[in-house]
Amino acid sequence: MARKKKVKLPKTIPTHIAIIMDGNGRWARSRALPRNAGHRAGVENLRPVLEACVEFGIRYLTVYAFSTENWERPADEVQGLMNILEDVIDREITELHENGVKLRHLGHLERLRPALQEKVLKAIDLTKDNTRISLNIAWNYGGRDELVRAIRKLIEDGVPAEDITEALVGDYLYTAGCPDPDMIIRTAGDQRVSNFLLWQGAYAELYVTPTYWPDFGREDLLDALHQYASRERRFGRVPGPVTSS
Ligand code: FPP
């Protein structure tokens, strides 16, 4: 196995990074391949990026794999993506579990085939006590849809309006119990958040790279981490110690 180049890590490492894995289609087109070949290359790229996250001390990795809007894509592409999810679970779940990866699903399963729903739930259950790194897969996920569902549930639970706090809303989201992402990386150059983690990403640092997702590797992640460490996160405050005026 090729030896990994020793890297110089920045002092501040984000706890949670989230990735909009964009550019699979363009990656495929640039090679005259069908779009689903790009998605296959994209999923193959998850493993080295996940390994790099473990190596660099990142505790949570969230990936945007299938959005609530992606159902509008051609049927064969949607089917191809569903097959990829199923193959990944079949092929990788044992190794992920043995390596301490806790799998979590962000989104809802309703439109997935029952057998696939069951596989996802089983994989989550198998890995639920793992602690090395959490891998959140956003699948059939939309930030607006997540908020609508949270509001409905709050109402169904009869929560009085005055009891609704930011913390409580957070408990009703798919990410309940998971820290907010510190950084959102988007590959393939577009500068938008595309309905991803709308609530949780309120103060995430955005990092956009022109690299297509299947080509985004350990060195690219490291560049993003250096960029992150150089940012000043103020969370709406002014820099420096807190003083009263
Ligand atoms: C965006 O590229 C990518 C997607 C919509 C799908 C991403 C899915 C994977 C990488 C597979 C992941 C699977 C699992 C199980 C986690 P695009 O198709 O929009 O590319 P384009 O903008 O270049 O057309």
Image (cartoon, rainbow, N blue to C red):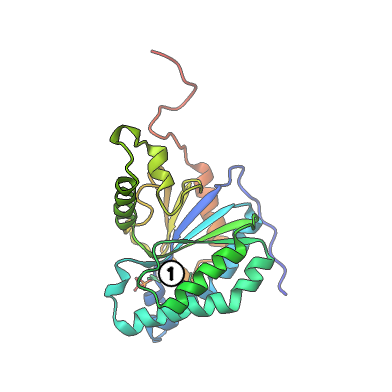
Q: Quadrant of residue 109?
A: bottom left
For image coordinates 56% across by 69% down, the residue present is 123
Residue annotated with mark 1: 212
Establish if 199 lies above or below 106: above
* Image coordinates for residue 165, horizontal then vertical, percent: 37, 36
* Image coordinates for residue 168, horizontal then vertical, percent: 40, 40
- Point out the image quarter for the N terminus: bottom right
Near-viewer residue (220 or 241): 241
Near-viewer residue (75 or 147): 147
For image coordinates 51% across by 74% down, the residue present is 119
* Image coordinates for residue 57, horizontal then vertical, percent: 63, 52
Establish if 225 lies above or below 28: above
- Point out the image quarter for the C terminus: top left
Element class at badge 1: loop
For image coordinates 47% across by 49% down, the residue present is 176
Label 1: few (<14), some or many (≥20) within 10 Å? many
Q: Quadrant of residue 139?
A: bottom left
* Image coordinates for residue 105, horizontal then vertical, percent: 47, 62
Mark 1 residue type: Tyr
Q: Count the marks.
A: 1
